[in-house]
Image: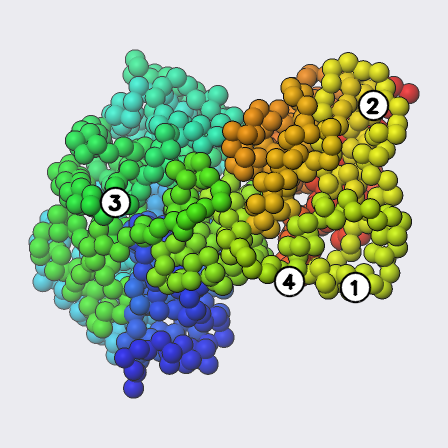
Amino acid sequence: MPSSDPAPALHEELRRELCGEVRFDTAERAVYGYDASNYRHPPLGVVKPADTDDVRAAVRLCREYGVPLVPRGAGTSIGGQAIGPGAVVLDFRRHLGKVLAVDPDARTARVEPGAVLDRLQAAAAPYGLRFGPDPSTHGRCTLGGMIGNDSCGSHSIAWGRTADNLRALDLLLADGTELTVTGPRSAAERAALRDRPGREGELHRALQDLTAAHLPALRQGMPALPRRASGYDLDALLPERGYDLARAVTGTEGTCAVLLGATVELVEAPPATALVVAGYPDETAAADAVPALLPLRPLTAEGMAADLIAALLAAGRRPPALDRLPDGACWLFLETGGATPAAALAAARELADAVRREPRATVTVVTDPGEQRRLWAVREAGAGIVTRLPDGGEAWPGWEDSAVPVERLGDYLRALRALLGRHRLRGIPYGHFGEGCIHLRLDFPLTDPQRLPEFREFMEQAADLVVAHGGSLSGEHGDGQARGELLTRMYPPEIIDLFGRFKRIWDPAGLLNPGTVVDPRPLDADLRFPGRDLLPLALPYERDGGSLLTAVHRCVGVGRCVATDGGGVMCPSYQVTGEERHSTRGRARLLGEMLRGELVTDGWRSAEVREALDLCLGCKGCASDCPTQVDMATYRSEFLHQHYRRRLRPAGHYSMGWLPLTLRLPVPRRLLNRLFRSPAAALLKRIGGIDPRRELPPPASETFERWFRRRTAAPGGREVLLWPDTFTNHLDPAPARAAVELLEQLGYTVRLPEGPVCCGLTWHSTGQLGVARLVLRRSLAALPAGLPVLGLDPSCTATLREELPRLLGPAAGDVPGRVHTLAEFLDREGVELPRLDGVRAITQTHCHQHAVLGTAADRRLDRRTGLDNRVLDSGCCGLAGNFGFERGHYEVSVALAERVLLPAVRAADEDTVLLADGFSCRTQIGQLGDGRRAVHLAQLLRDALREQRG
């Protein structure tokens, strides 16, 4: 018999019977206690089933122990549907994510519940097909999650919601019953279902009897609008709708059954598209214009206000596509499709003409597919960008996706704006205007317990407002804890009672996601925000009011770090391990729990946080790629600083962290090189915490500084200061020599600092922040005033630009603003550069350049020189400074390189130049790239200029 604490015994039995992963440890419970909502519910444990037999066993054992279950896909639920207190979370995304088959003739696909939407789209694309619904989270949302929430996306006015695109659902009930449900049935088929034996027949009889007994209520009490995602779709059971059980189960948020698999319908993707962008004075004018445009049957009618653009700019992002937006303060994105580009353009022109009938409207037609993608990327960024207002204020979900009939959208927006004004709340509206659905995150006072009554008051009044306009509390994301309590304001008591009876028919014991939709938890309980900073902090967190807690709460769970759609840098270790705790989101959750002090109780000494951060490469990809700009590399440095304060550190922190000082010791370099190649190198690696499979980079026979000071400088003009970083100076001087020769050939006088300098990166990345601060102070004293500072290694250059002012504050002076990459300097100066016509190259972009410095200047140089340059979309090379050398990281380091970088290097012919400005990237290629060597941009340009000038 189960004990009062079922966790130990249940854990043991699950581990014994399942092939997949079973985790009941503190770190896993902390990470899976959150989704993308405002709520926190640490589970009892987490199960990552390897197959459907594992799912069956997990459901059976949880039933026997009376433990609730919460099915979970990508964990991006905004209402709190993917978390549950004391539950076992079933993570389907980890192992049950296959697209099993695509049938192009039937236009269907068979998918496992954890299949990510983009994988399905990729599998269907060769047949000219696609799945119609396309949420902005398409790179990580799962089909199971989409079915659970009845997801929609931008193209729902053309291809409908998830419920409109299902053929069959394979379900497992909490009592172990398995059945397959489909769409509408004839009267004879419905009667046959009643006669099925056992529990399945009993279920069909109960559902049909429930419907028959309440026909008037179901026909009159359910609002008829395309974006009704609140409550259960009980009217799908009506006889005139064919007892559409697949639709009735879709959107039940995991409260009725566990999905084992699905057969989904596919639609024909238009071979060509065009995009009409219409500008209006404000969002209400745009909303008012939509009904007249819908008869022209656009594929999308998406609204985006200027507030979202302001938020993008405030976050330091200016997408080039902004220049294509016509005048206005709110824009409609109206996509058209056709069998040919001419047909799509003709439909777009017809829409554009209709837009122009409104005197205040402006319009642009975009036909280039690349430009269309860039414009859509601005719209898709809304899911994360709107969590920060243009002035830096925080905005939270809650009233996230209300929907009204499209003809009433303008009136609803005006009334909603007035309600926001009365409550002094701000937010950035955008969304699916073509179906009356508005996304809106607001600056609710959720972090102040004294003001929570204000949050409840607004939510209740907003619910009454949307119902008064004939709408739904949710138009896309479902109810969860955020809106479940408000369903009584949308539906009459009889319907609310029917919701409860419907769930109990499926789940009599109430084991599946309890507290969601039926008997909901209070909307202002279980908030994730409590916590406190563990002072004093070593870093300023200037964008977050000096608070690490506020910085950590930047993560709202949208899950860009766990996306499978490729591109960007974030999050390297997750790309290899697939473990949630190794994602940016997972690490942020663990840090939040550390500051909360309930699950993770030992503060800065936490072993769970240390383990999760151990595989953080410090790439800073999240600082740029995360929509909310979570900067895990900075948080990691803070944690390591505090965790090892007055404690013995790992050996790698000393051997790699103090490398800049070690390399300056007066030891003959010839002796060091012999030592690194001798059998004693193995002992050095063991002592230094370095993986035995790594080669120790040999010191150069002559440092760059020594070469520079002994040579005769060429006469030149304007002075520039070259920063001799440790890696370039001591280990690979060739790029610095090339930079000097290039700059002198271009007419500049190159100077070096007036003494030894170091950016302190190796100390900063290992959390030795006091030493990093001291090193930077001494380095600044060696810099002459006024000169532009050229950095050759992106990691050191980024440190000078971003970490220097954080560590030294005003003492950093104007130095960060004077720091440039070589490409930035040459681009800004506009000097005549050698032609590289006919030269082919592939470029590995250093993570810190991607995240902090940017590559726009590099790409402009490509165009100016005629370089045929393929920039790899490879993410991190995997070495990441000290990371790839430290013991315990080798497998992850190599696996990252093998994703894209190394295959591209091996496939490149001998005439293709390998470009990598980062010392780490060149080292990784040199050690793992089958003998290929990469060069710095300075070397490529220097050699070309020499050849050009003879």
* Kind of residue at badge 3: Asp
- Nearest to viewer (mark 4 / mark 3): 3
Asked if the residue at tag 2 contacts the one at tag 4, i.e. Cβ–Cβ closer than 8 Å, the answer is: no
- The residue wearing badge 1 is 682
Q: Is residue 51 above or below residue 889?
A: below
Classify 400 as above or below 287: below
Q: Name the residue nearer the viewer: 297 or 185.
A: 297
User: Which quarter of the picture shows residue 889?
Assistant: bottom right
First in sequence, mark 4 or 1: give its number: 1
Residue 825 place in picture, x, y as percent:
67, 23
Q: Amino acid at mark 1?
A: Ala
Q: Which circle, 4 or 1, is nearer the viewer?
A: 1
**Mark 4 residue element:** loop
Q: CA distance from mark 3 to mark 2?
A: 62 Å
Q: Nearer the viewer, residue 46 or 502?
A: 46
What secondary structure is marked by label 3? loop
Cα separation, mark 3 vs mark 1, equals 56 Å
* Residue occupying the point 15% across, 38% down: 465
Q: Which residue is mark 4?
A: 888
Q: Is residue 781 visible?
A: yes
The residue under the point 46% across, 57% down is 604
Report the quarter where the N terminus lies.
Answer: bottom left
- Residue 81, image x, y percentages: 31, 56
Q: Helix or strand or loop: what does disc 2 sit on?
A: helix
Residue tagged by mark 2?
A: 945
Residue 335, picture quadrant? top left
Badge nearest the viewer, 3 or 2: 3
Please rate how many residues cluster around mark 1, counting C-alpha atoms within 10 Å: few if below 14, some from 14 to 19, many from 20: some
Q: Is there any visible trace of residue 355 in the rendered image?
A: no
